[in-house]
Image: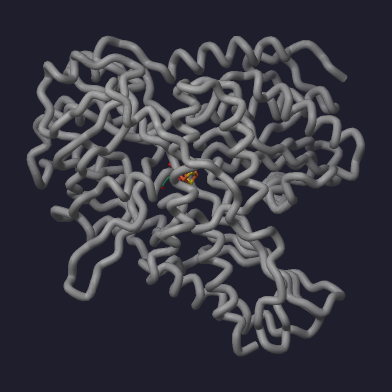
Amino acid sequence: MEHFEESILKLIVDTSTNLPPDVRRAVEQAQIREEIGSRAALALDTIVENVLLAEEEQGPICQDTGMPTFEVHTPVGANQIVMERQIKSAVAEATRLGKLRTNSVDSLTGKNTGDNLGPGTPVIHFRQWENDEIDVRLILKGGGCENKNIQYSLPTDLPGLGKAGRDLDGIRKCIMHAVYQAQGQGCSAGFIGVSIGGDRTTGYQHAKEQLFRHLDDQNPVPELAKLESYIMEHANELGVGTMGFGGRVSLLGCKIAAQNRLPASFFVSVAYNCWAFRRQGVRIDPRTGEILNWIYKQGTSDLKRKESAVFSDKVKVLRAPISEEAIRALHVGDVVLIRGEMHTGRDALHKYLMDHDAPVSLDGGVLYHCGPVMLKDDQGKWHVKAAGPTTSAREEPYQAEIIQKFGLRAVIGKGGMGAKTLAGLKASGAVYLNAIGGAAQYYAKSVEAVNGVDFLDEFGIPEAMWHLQVNGFPAIVTMDSHGNSLHADVDKQSFKKLEAFADPVY
Ligand SMILES: O=C(O)C[C@H](O)C(=O)O
Ligand code: SF4
Protein backbone atom coordinates (compact mmCIF):
# COMPACT_ATOMS: atom_id res chain seq x y z
CA MET A 1 0.00 0.00 0.00
CA GLU A 2 3.04 2.20 -0.51
CA HIS A 3 1.23 4.39 -3.06
CA PHE A 4 -2.18 4.66 -1.38
CA GLU A 5 -1.72 8.18 0.03
CA GLU A 6 -0.32 9.47 -3.25
CA SER A 7 -3.32 7.95 -5.09
CA ILE A 8 -5.74 9.67 -2.72
CA LEU A 9 -3.95 12.97 -3.27
CA LYS A 10 -4.37 12.52 -7.04
CA LEU A 11 -8.05 11.79 -6.49
CA ILE A 12 -8.52 14.95 -4.42
CA VAL A 13 -6.68 17.17 -6.89
CA ASP A 14 -8.63 15.82 -9.84
CA THR A 15 -11.97 16.12 -8.05
CA SER A 16 -11.32 19.72 -7.07
CA THR A 17 -9.91 20.95 -10.37
CA ASN A 18 -11.27 18.84 -13.19
CA LEU A 19 -15.02 18.62 -13.74
CA PRO A 20 -15.99 15.15 -15.05
CA PRO A 21 -17.23 14.90 -18.68
CA ASP A 22 -20.80 13.87 -17.77
CA VAL A 23 -21.15 17.07 -15.71
CA ARG A 24 -19.54 19.12 -18.46
CA ARG A 25 -22.01 17.69 -20.97
CA ALA A 26 -24.92 18.73 -18.75
CA VAL A 27 -23.51 22.28 -18.51
CA GLU A 28 -22.97 22.34 -22.26
CA GLN A 29 -26.57 21.25 -22.91
CA ALA A 30 -27.78 24.09 -20.70
CA GLN A 31 -25.58 26.52 -22.61
CA ILE A 32 -27.18 25.37 -25.87
CA ARG A 33 -30.70 25.76 -24.49
CA GLU A 34 -30.38 29.24 -23.06
CA GLU A 35 -31.20 32.19 -25.25
CA ILE A 36 -28.10 33.91 -26.63
CA GLY A 37 -27.48 37.21 -24.89
CA SER A 38 -29.66 36.39 -21.87
CA ARG A 39 -28.32 36.75 -18.32
CA ALA A 40 -28.45 32.97 -17.89
CA ALA A 41 -26.39 32.50 -21.07
CA LEU A 42 -23.84 35.03 -19.83
CA ALA A 43 -23.61 33.17 -16.51
CA LEU A 44 -23.16 29.84 -18.29
CA ASP A 45 -20.43 31.27 -20.52
CA THR A 46 -18.60 32.39 -17.38
CA ILE A 47 -19.06 28.94 -15.83
CA VAL A 48 -17.62 27.25 -18.93
CA GLU A 49 -14.68 29.65 -18.99
CA ASN A 50 -14.10 28.85 -15.31
CA VAL A 51 -14.21 25.07 -15.81
CA LEU A 52 -11.61 25.36 -18.57
CA LEU A 53 -9.40 27.70 -16.52
CA ALA A 54 -9.52 25.34 -13.53
CA GLU A 55 -8.41 22.46 -15.68
CA GLU A 56 -5.59 24.44 -17.30
CA GLU A 57 -4.25 25.88 -14.05
CA GLN A 58 -5.06 22.86 -11.86
CA GLY A 59 -6.85 25.29 -9.56
CA PRO A 60 -10.03 24.64 -7.54
CA ILE A 61 -13.12 24.99 -9.74
CA CYS A 62 -14.85 26.69 -6.80
CA GLN A 63 -13.13 28.19 -3.75
CA ASP A 64 -15.49 26.25 -1.50
CA THR A 65 -14.07 22.76 -1.78
CA GLY A 66 -16.77 21.59 0.59
CA MET A 67 -16.84 18.85 3.14
CA PRO A 68 -14.52 16.21 1.68
CA THR A 69 -16.65 13.05 1.82
CA PHE A 70 -15.06 9.69 1.02
CA GLU A 71 -17.05 6.51 0.41
CA VAL A 72 -14.63 3.60 0.55
CA HIS A 73 -15.20 -0.08 -0.25
CA THR A 74 -12.44 -2.41 0.85
CA PRO A 75 -11.72 -6.12 0.39
CA VAL A 76 -12.22 -8.23 3.50
CA GLY A 77 -9.13 -8.00 5.70
CA ALA A 78 -7.79 -4.70 4.31
CA ASN A 79 -6.51 -2.36 7.03
CA GLN A 80 -9.02 0.49 7.28
CA ILE A 81 -7.17 2.19 10.12
CA VAL A 82 -4.09 2.73 7.97
CA MET A 83 -6.27 3.89 5.07
CA GLU A 84 -8.05 6.43 7.25
CA ARG A 85 -4.72 7.83 8.45
CA GLN A 86 -3.43 8.14 4.89
CA ILE A 87 -6.64 9.71 3.60
CA LYS A 88 -6.36 12.37 6.32
CA SER A 89 -2.73 12.97 5.49
CA ALA A 90 -3.60 13.38 1.78
CA VAL A 91 -6.36 15.85 2.70
CA ALA A 92 -3.89 17.94 4.71
CA GLU A 93 -1.40 17.87 1.85
CA ALA A 94 -4.03 18.89 -0.74
CA THR A 95 -4.91 21.79 1.56
CA ARG A 96 -1.26 22.84 1.84
CA LEU A 97 -1.04 22.82 -1.97
CA GLY A 98 -4.11 25.07 -2.30
CA LYS A 99 -6.26 22.40 -3.97
CA LEU A 100 -8.62 22.39 -0.99
CA ARG A 101 -9.64 25.45 1.02
CA THR A 102 -9.07 25.40 4.78
CA ASN A 103 -12.65 24.41 5.53
CA SER A 104 -12.64 22.83 8.99
CA VAL A 105 -13.87 25.29 11.62
CA ASP A 106 -14.28 24.64 15.36
CA SER A 107 -18.00 25.16 15.92
CA LEU A 108 -17.55 26.59 19.41
CA THR A 109 -14.46 28.81 19.09
CA GLY A 110 -14.68 29.65 15.36
CA LYS A 111 -11.00 28.67 14.96
CA ASN A 112 -10.04 27.23 11.60
CA THR A 113 -7.79 24.19 11.98
CA GLY A 114 -5.94 25.21 8.80
CA ASP A 115 -5.52 21.68 7.42
CA ASN A 116 -9.10 20.44 6.93
CA LEU A 117 -8.72 17.99 9.81
CA GLY A 118 -10.75 18.02 12.99
CA PRO A 119 -13.70 16.35 14.69
CA GLY A 120 -16.05 15.26 11.90
CA THR A 121 -13.81 16.38 9.04
CA PRO A 122 -13.14 14.87 6.60
CA VAL A 123 -16.04 12.43 6.36
CA ILE A 124 -14.90 8.87 5.66
CA HIS A 125 -17.29 5.92 5.38
CA PHE A 126 -15.89 2.42 5.05
CA ARG A 127 -17.70 -0.67 3.84
CA GLN A 128 -16.35 -4.09 3.13
CA TRP A 129 -17.15 -5.92 -0.05
CA GLU A 130 -16.29 -9.27 -1.60
CA ASN A 131 -14.16 -7.79 -4.30
CA ASP A 132 -10.38 -7.70 -4.71
CA GLU A 133 -10.00 -3.99 -5.26
CA ILE A 134 -10.38 -0.88 -3.13
CA ASP A 135 -12.97 1.57 -4.45
CA VAL A 136 -12.68 5.17 -3.21
CA ARG A 137 -15.21 7.80 -4.20
CA LEU A 138 -14.99 11.43 -3.22
CA ILE A 139 -17.52 14.23 -3.36
CA LEU A 140 -16.63 17.87 -2.64
CA LYS A 141 -20.00 19.45 -2.00
CA GLY A 142 -19.84 23.08 -0.91
CA GLY A 143 -21.63 24.77 1.97
CA GLY A 144 -23.93 26.94 -0.12
CA CYS A 145 -25.63 24.05 -1.84
CA GLU A 146 -25.46 21.94 1.33
CA ASN A 147 -27.56 24.65 3.00
CA LYS A 148 -30.16 24.10 0.29
CA ASN A 149 -30.62 20.40 1.07
CA ILE A 150 -34.12 19.88 2.31
CA GLN A 151 -36.06 17.12 4.04
CA TYR A 152 -39.83 16.73 3.91
CA SER A 153 -41.92 14.69 6.31
CA LEU A 154 -45.09 13.44 4.62
CA PRO A 155 -47.95 14.13 4.73
CA THR A 156 -47.47 17.87 4.59
CA ASP A 157 -48.80 21.05 3.03
CA LEU A 158 -46.36 22.62 0.60
CA PRO A 159 -46.40 26.31 -0.31
CA GLY A 160 -47.87 26.69 -3.78
CA LEU A 161 -48.51 22.97 -4.20
CA GLY A 162 -50.95 22.09 -1.42
CA LYS A 163 -51.25 18.69 0.17
CA ALA A 164 -48.43 16.22 -0.38
CA GLY A 165 -49.45 12.72 0.71
CA ARG A 166 -47.52 9.52 1.26
CA ASP A 167 -47.50 8.50 -2.38
CA LEU A 168 -45.64 9.14 -5.63
CA ASP A 169 -47.60 12.32 -6.22
CA GLY A 170 -46.62 13.69 -2.82
CA ILE A 171 -42.99 12.81 -3.56
CA ARG A 172 -43.23 14.56 -6.93
CA LYS A 173 -44.44 17.73 -5.23
CA CYS A 174 -41.61 17.66 -2.66
CA ILE A 175 -38.97 17.41 -5.38
CA MET A 176 -40.48 20.24 -7.44
CA HIS A 177 -40.56 22.35 -4.29
CA ALA A 178 -36.94 21.46 -3.49
CA VAL A 179 -35.76 22.88 -6.82
CA TYR A 180 -37.89 26.01 -6.41
CA GLN A 181 -36.72 26.76 -2.86
CA ALA A 182 -33.03 26.59 -3.80
CA GLN A 183 -33.44 29.54 -6.21
CA GLY A 184 -29.93 30.75 -7.15
CA GLN A 185 -28.48 30.30 -3.69
CA GLY A 186 -27.11 26.83 -4.29
CA CYS A 187 -25.56 28.02 -7.57
CA SER A 188 -28.22 26.69 -9.89
CA ALA A 189 -28.58 24.96 -12.22
CA GLY A 190 -28.12 22.08 -9.80
CA PHE A 191 -28.09 18.31 -9.53
CA ILE A 192 -30.29 16.57 -6.99
CA GLY A 193 -30.04 13.24 -5.25
CA VAL A 194 -33.32 12.17 -3.67
CA SER A 195 -34.02 9.54 -1.07
CA ILE A 196 -37.52 8.30 -0.31
CA GLY A 197 -37.84 6.70 3.13
CA GLY A 198 -35.21 5.89 5.74
CA ASP A 199 -35.02 7.96 8.90
CA ARG A 200 -33.86 11.58 9.17
CA THR A 201 -30.18 10.58 9.22
CA THR A 202 -30.15 7.79 6.64
CA GLY A 203 -32.48 9.79 4.39
CA TYR A 204 -29.91 12.53 3.88
CA GLN A 205 -27.08 10.03 3.67
CA HIS A 206 -28.88 7.99 1.00
CA ALA A 207 -29.83 11.17 -0.90
CA LYS A 208 -26.17 12.20 -1.07
CA GLU A 209 -25.19 8.71 -2.22
CA GLN A 210 -27.41 9.18 -5.28
CA LEU A 211 -25.06 11.95 -6.38
CA PHE A 212 -22.45 9.26 -7.06
CA ARG A 213 -24.58 7.75 -9.81
CA HIS A 214 -23.53 8.35 -13.39
CA LEU A 215 -25.65 11.09 -14.89
CA ASP A 216 -26.63 8.95 -17.86
CA ASP A 217 -27.49 5.76 -15.97
CA GLN A 218 -30.97 4.26 -16.12
CA ASN A 219 -32.90 3.95 -12.86
CA PRO A 220 -33.65 0.21 -12.41
CA VAL A 221 -37.03 0.95 -10.77
CA PRO A 222 -39.48 1.86 -13.56
CA GLU A 223 -41.64 4.23 -11.45
CA LEU A 224 -38.55 6.10 -10.29
CA ALA A 225 -37.11 6.24 -13.82
CA LYS A 226 -40.40 7.84 -14.87
CA LEU A 227 -40.34 10.26 -11.97
CA GLU A 228 -36.75 11.28 -12.76
CA SER A 229 -37.74 12.12 -16.37
CA TYR A 230 -40.81 13.99 -15.17
CA ILE A 231 -38.71 16.09 -12.80
CA MET A 232 -36.01 16.77 -15.41
CA GLU A 233 -38.63 17.99 -17.82
CA HIS A 234 -40.81 20.03 -15.50
CA ALA A 235 -38.34 21.46 -12.98
CA ASN A 236 -36.86 23.27 -15.95
CA GLU A 237 -40.20 25.00 -16.46
CA LEU A 238 -39.84 26.74 -13.09
CA GLY A 239 -37.70 29.47 -14.65
CA VAL A 240 -35.18 29.77 -11.81
CA GLY A 241 -32.33 29.61 -14.32
CA THR A 242 -28.59 29.72 -13.85
CA MET A 243 -27.68 31.60 -10.63
CA GLY A 244 -31.37 32.40 -10.17
CA PHE A 245 -31.24 34.87 -13.07
CA GLY A 246 -34.33 33.32 -14.69
CA GLY A 247 -33.98 31.06 -17.71
CA ARG A 248 -34.82 27.79 -19.32
CA VAL A 249 -32.55 25.51 -17.30
CA SER A 250 -32.87 25.14 -13.52
CA LEU A 251 -31.90 21.50 -13.04
CA LEU A 252 -29.08 19.51 -14.64
CA GLY A 253 -29.60 16.10 -13.09
CA CYS A 254 -32.00 14.13 -10.89
CA LYS A 255 -31.39 10.73 -9.30
CA ILE A 256 -34.01 9.15 -7.05
CA ALA A 257 -33.91 6.01 -4.90
CA ALA A 258 -36.10 4.49 -2.20
CA GLN A 259 -35.32 2.66 1.02
CA ASN A 260 -37.64 1.24 3.63
CA ARG A 261 -39.08 3.41 6.38
CA LEU A 262 -40.78 3.13 9.73
CA PRO A 263 -44.59 2.98 9.70
CA ALA A 264 -44.75 6.40 11.39
CA SER A 265 -42.19 8.16 9.18
CA PHE A 266 -42.19 9.08 5.52
CA PHE A 267 -39.23 11.29 4.60
CA VAL A 268 -38.30 12.68 1.23
CA SER A 269 -34.72 13.92 1.53
CA VAL A 270 -33.11 16.00 -1.16
CA ALA A 271 -29.37 16.61 -1.52
CA TYR A 272 -28.91 19.68 -3.71
CA ASN A 273 -25.59 20.02 -5.49
CA CYS A 274 -24.51 23.16 -7.33
CA TRP A 275 -23.44 23.12 -10.98
CA ALA A 276 -19.87 22.68 -9.66
CA PHE A 277 -20.64 19.02 -9.17
CA ARG A 278 -17.28 17.67 -8.09
CA ARG A 279 -17.23 13.94 -7.62
CA GLN A 280 -14.73 11.40 -8.76
CA GLY A 281 -13.57 7.91 -7.81
CA VAL A 282 -10.74 5.47 -8.26
CA ARG A 283 -10.18 1.73 -8.14
CA ILE A 284 -7.01 0.97 -6.20
CA ASP A 285 -4.74 -2.07 -6.11
CA PRO A 286 -4.77 -3.24 -2.45
CA ARG A 287 -1.18 -4.54 -2.71
CA THR A 288 0.54 -1.43 -4.09
CA GLY A 289 -2.02 1.29 -3.42
CA GLU A 290 -1.75 2.38 -7.06
CA ILE A 291 -4.69 3.64 -9.10
CA LEU A 292 -5.99 0.95 -11.46
CA ASN A 293 -8.62 3.10 -13.12
CA TRP A 294 -10.85 6.15 -12.69
CA ILE A 295 -14.53 5.51 -12.04
CA TYR A 296 -15.88 8.55 -13.83
CA LYS A 297 -14.01 9.63 -16.92
CA GLN A 298 -11.57 12.43 -16.22
CA GLY A 299 -12.22 16.00 -17.46
CA THR A 300 -11.49 17.30 -20.92
CA SER A 301 -14.36 17.67 -23.31
CA ASP A 302 -15.26 20.00 -26.07
CA LEU A 303 -16.74 22.74 -23.88
CA LYS A 304 -16.35 25.89 -25.95
CA ARG A 305 -15.26 29.26 -24.73
CA LYS A 306 -17.66 31.97 -25.83
CA GLU A 307 -17.01 35.65 -26.26
CA SER A 308 -18.86 36.94 -23.25
CA ALA A 309 -21.12 39.99 -23.10
CA VAL A 310 -18.80 41.32 -20.41
CA PHE A 311 -16.58 42.61 -23.20
CA SER A 312 -19.34 44.57 -24.90
CA ASP A 313 -19.42 48.37 -24.82
CA LYS A 314 -22.56 48.37 -22.65
CA VAL A 315 -20.43 47.58 -19.64
CA LYS A 316 -20.06 50.34 -17.02
CA VAL A 317 -16.77 50.76 -15.24
CA LEU A 318 -16.89 51.46 -11.50
CA ARG A 319 -13.75 52.77 -9.82
CA ALA A 320 -13.52 52.26 -6.07
CA PRO A 321 -14.11 54.35 -4.00
CA ILE A 322 -17.42 54.83 -5.83
CA SER A 323 -19.59 57.95 -5.70
CA GLU A 324 -23.29 57.90 -4.83
CA GLU A 325 -24.03 59.45 -8.23
CA ALA A 326 -22.40 56.54 -10.07
CA ILE A 327 -24.47 54.10 -8.00
CA ARG A 328 -27.77 55.88 -8.53
CA ALA A 329 -27.15 55.68 -12.30
CA LEU A 330 -27.18 51.88 -12.16
CA HIS A 331 -30.22 49.67 -12.73
CA VAL A 332 -30.97 45.98 -12.45
CA GLY A 333 -29.48 44.19 -15.45
CA ASP A 334 -26.47 46.49 -15.90
CA VAL A 335 -23.12 44.77 -16.23
CA VAL A 336 -20.28 46.50 -14.39
CA LEU A 337 -16.52 46.12 -14.24
CA ILE A 338 -14.90 47.06 -10.95
CA ARG A 339 -11.46 48.57 -10.74
CA GLY A 340 -9.58 49.48 -7.57
CA GLU A 341 -9.66 47.94 -4.11
CA MET A 342 -12.35 45.65 -2.76
CA HIS A 343 -12.55 43.98 0.64
CA THR A 344 -13.71 40.46 1.35
CA GLY A 345 -16.04 39.89 4.27
CA ARG A 346 -18.42 37.14 5.21
CA ASP A 347 -20.13 35.80 8.30
CA ALA A 348 -17.52 36.49 10.99
CA LEU A 349 -16.70 39.97 9.67
CA HIS A 350 -20.33 41.07 9.42
CA LYS A 351 -20.98 40.07 12.99
CA TYR A 352 -17.80 41.85 14.10
CA LEU A 353 -18.55 45.08 12.22
CA MET A 354 -21.92 45.43 13.90
CA ASP A 355 -20.25 46.65 17.06
CA HIS A 356 -16.67 47.49 16.08
CA ASP A 357 -14.93 49.87 13.71
CA ALA A 358 -13.54 48.62 10.42
CA PRO A 359 -9.74 48.32 10.22
CA VAL A 360 -9.73 50.33 6.95
CA SER A 361 -12.01 53.04 5.55
CA LEU A 362 -14.97 51.53 3.73
CA ASP A 363 -16.34 54.87 2.58
CA GLY A 364 -17.45 54.45 -1.06
CA GLY A 365 -16.11 50.92 -0.74
CA VAL A 366 -16.89 47.54 -2.25
CA LEU A 367 -17.48 44.57 0.04
CA TYR A 368 -17.14 41.16 -1.52
CA HIS A 369 -18.89 38.19 0.11
CA CYS A 370 -16.05 35.81 -0.55
CA GLY A 371 -13.88 33.31 1.29
CA PRO A 372 -10.94 32.75 -1.03
CA VAL A 373 -8.29 30.06 -1.28
CA MET A 374 -5.00 31.84 -0.51
CA LEU A 375 -1.40 30.66 -0.57
CA LYS A 376 1.66 32.38 0.85
CA ASP A 377 4.91 32.14 -1.13
CA ASP A 378 8.43 31.79 0.28
CA GLN A 379 8.79 35.59 0.38
CA GLY A 380 5.69 35.84 2.56
CA LYS A 381 3.55 37.27 -0.27
CA TRP A 382 -0.07 36.17 -0.51
CA HIS A 383 -1.62 34.88 -3.76
CA VAL A 384 -5.28 34.35 -4.59
CA LYS A 385 -5.82 30.80 -5.80
CA ALA A 386 -9.63 30.83 -6.08
CA ALA A 387 -12.10 33.59 -5.24
CA GLY A 388 -15.74 33.23 -6.23
CA PRO A 389 -18.66 34.70 -4.26
CA THR A 390 -20.44 33.10 -1.33
CA THR A 391 -24.19 33.09 -0.58
CA SER A 392 -25.14 36.61 0.49
CA ALA A 393 -28.44 35.74 2.16
CA ARG A 394 -26.60 34.74 5.33
CA GLU A 395 -25.65 38.39 5.88
CA GLU A 396 -29.23 39.62 5.58
CA PRO A 397 -29.56 40.36 9.32
CA TYR A 398 -26.51 42.68 9.21
CA GLN A 399 -26.10 44.08 5.71
CA ALA A 400 -28.30 47.18 5.63
CA GLU A 401 -26.85 48.49 8.90
CA ILE A 402 -23.29 47.84 7.81
CA ILE A 403 -23.80 49.59 4.48
CA GLN A 404 -25.12 52.61 6.31
CA LYS A 405 -22.60 52.60 9.15
CA PHE A 406 -19.53 52.46 6.88
CA GLY A 407 -20.75 54.18 3.71
CA LEU A 408 -20.34 51.13 1.49
CA ARG A 409 -21.49 51.64 -2.10
CA ALA A 410 -21.45 48.10 -3.44
CA VAL A 411 -21.85 44.64 -2.03
CA ILE A 412 -20.91 41.70 -4.24
CA GLY A 413 -22.11 38.17 -3.65
CA LYS A 414 -24.44 35.60 -5.10
CA GLY A 415 -27.99 34.42 -4.68
CA GLY A 416 -29.30 37.87 -3.78
CA MET A 417 -30.50 39.39 -0.51
CA GLY A 418 -33.84 40.18 1.07
CA ALA A 419 -36.22 43.05 1.65
CA LYS A 420 -34.25 44.62 4.51
CA THR A 421 -31.11 44.95 2.40
CA LEU A 422 -33.11 46.19 -0.59
CA ALA A 423 -34.54 48.99 1.54
CA GLY A 424 -31.03 49.71 2.88
CA LEU A 425 -29.62 50.01 -0.66
CA LYS A 426 -32.26 52.59 -1.49
CA ALA A 427 -31.79 54.57 1.70
CA SER A 428 -27.98 54.64 1.56
CA GLY A 429 -27.41 54.73 -2.20
CA ALA A 430 -25.75 51.36 -2.73
CA VAL A 431 -26.08 48.37 -5.07
CA TYR A 432 -25.97 44.61 -4.82
CA LEU A 433 -23.87 43.03 -7.51
CA ASN A 434 -24.14 39.39 -8.42
CA ALA A 435 -21.02 37.49 -9.34
CA ILE A 436 -21.31 34.01 -10.84
CA GLY A 437 -21.15 31.47 -8.02
CA GLY A 438 -18.43 28.89 -8.34
CA ALA A 439 -16.46 30.84 -10.96
CA ALA A 440 -13.50 31.00 -8.61
CA GLN A 441 -10.69 30.79 -11.16
CA TYR A 442 -12.33 33.36 -13.37
CA TYR A 443 -12.55 35.94 -10.57
CA ALA A 444 -9.13 35.10 -9.13
CA LYS A 445 -7.70 36.21 -12.47
CA SER A 446 -9.06 39.72 -12.05
CA VAL A 447 -7.09 40.23 -8.81
CA GLU A 448 -3.89 42.14 -9.53
CA ALA A 449 -2.51 42.26 -5.99
CA VAL A 450 -3.28 41.40 -2.39
CA ASN A 451 -2.94 44.76 -0.61
CA GLY A 452 -3.26 43.33 2.88
CA VAL A 453 -5.33 41.25 5.26
CA ASP A 454 -7.03 41.77 8.63
CA PHE A 455 -8.33 39.24 11.16
CA LEU A 456 -6.38 36.37 9.62
CA ASP A 457 -5.43 34.83 12.96
CA GLU A 458 -8.83 35.37 14.52
CA PHE A 459 -11.08 34.27 11.66
CA GLY A 460 -8.87 32.02 9.46
CA ILE A 461 -8.33 32.31 5.70
CA PRO A 462 -11.91 32.08 4.37
CA GLU A 463 -13.38 34.51 6.92
CA ALA A 464 -10.52 37.03 7.06
CA MET A 465 -10.85 40.50 5.54
CA TRP A 466 -8.66 40.47 2.44
CA HIS A 467 -7.95 43.74 0.67
CA LEU A 468 -7.77 42.92 -3.01
CA GLN A 469 -6.71 45.16 -5.87
CA VAL A 470 -8.82 44.25 -8.88
CA ASN A 471 -8.65 45.33 -12.45
CA GLY A 472 -11.91 44.67 -14.23
CA PHE A 473 -13.94 42.44 -11.91
CA PRO A 474 -17.23 41.78 -13.78
CA ALA A 475 -20.60 41.54 -12.03
CA ILE A 476 -24.28 42.14 -12.75
CA VAL A 477 -26.51 44.58 -10.89
CA THR A 478 -29.33 42.42 -9.50
CA MET A 479 -30.54 44.80 -6.75
CA ASP A 480 -30.36 48.52 -7.40
CA SER A 481 -30.78 51.67 -5.33
CA HIS A 482 -34.28 52.27 -6.74
CA GLY A 483 -36.00 49.39 -5.00
CA ASN A 484 -35.69 46.79 -7.79
CA SER A 485 -34.56 43.23 -7.17
CA LEU A 486 -34.16 40.61 -9.85
CA HIS A 487 -34.13 37.98 -7.07
CA ALA A 488 -37.52 39.03 -5.72
CA ASP A 489 -38.91 39.05 -9.28
CA VAL A 490 -37.57 35.61 -10.22
CA ASP A 491 -38.76 34.17 -6.90
CA LYS A 492 -42.26 35.53 -7.50
CA GLN A 493 -42.41 34.33 -11.09
CA SER A 494 -41.06 30.89 -10.30
CA PHE A 495 -43.52 30.53 -7.40
CA LYS A 496 -46.35 31.19 -9.86
CA LYS A 497 -44.96 28.51 -12.15
CA LEU A 498 -44.64 26.13 -9.20
CA GLU A 499 -48.36 26.55 -8.49
CA ALA A 500 -49.10 25.11 -11.93
CA PHE A 501 -47.83 21.74 -10.65
CA ALA A 502 -50.37 21.44 -7.84
CA ASP A 503 -52.76 19.13 -9.75
CA PRO A 504 -52.14 15.41 -9.28
CA VAL A 505 -50.14 13.65 -11.96
CA TYR A 506 -50.21 10.14 -10.50
O1 LIG B 1 -18.13 29.12 1.29
C1 LIG B 1 -18.10 29.56 0.13
O2 LIG B 1 -17.13 30.16 -0.34
C2 LIG B 1 -19.27 29.45 -0.77
C3 LIG B 1 -20.39 28.56 -0.33
O3 LIG B 1 -20.28 27.30 -0.86
C4 LIG B 1 -21.67 29.13 -0.82
O4 LIG B 1 -22.20 28.65 -1.82
O5 LIG B 1 -22.18 30.04 -0.19
S1 SF4 C 1 -20.16 28.77 -4.20
FE1 SF4 C 1 -21.66 27.78 -5.45
S2 SF4 C 1 -20.45 26.47 -6.77
FE2 SF4 C 1 -19.21 26.93 -4.97
S3 SF4 C 1 -19.66 25.32 -3.51
FE3 SF4 C 1 -21.01 27.07 -3.02
S4 SF4 C 1 -22.86 26.44 -4.08
FE4 SF4 C 1 -21.21 25.26 -5.03
- Left/right of residue 395 with respect to residue 136 in the rendered view: left
Residue 420 position in % (x across, y down): 32, 19
Quarter holding the C terminus?
top right
Which corner quadrant of the image does residue 179 belong to?
top right
| Residue under the image location 72 percent in, 45 percent down | 215
| Residue under the image location 58 percent in, 14 percent down | 495
Which corner quadrant of the image does residue 192 belong to?
top right
From this view, report whether residue 100 is shown above or below residue 410.
below
From this view, report whether residue 452 is shown above or below residue 345.
below
From this view, report whether residue 169 is shown above or below residue 88.
above
Asked if one can make out residue 340 in the rendered structure from this viewpoint, the answer is: yes
Residue 437 position in % (x across, y down): 43, 39
Residue 248 position in % (x across, y down): 60, 22
From this view, report whether residue 83 is shown above or below residue 500.
below
Residue 424 position in % (x across, y down): 24, 19
Quarter holding the N terminus?
bottom right
| Residue under the image location 29 percent in, 14 percent down | 331
| Residue under the image location 62 percent in, 53 percent down | 20
- Left/right of residue 283 with respect to residue 357 in the rendered view: right
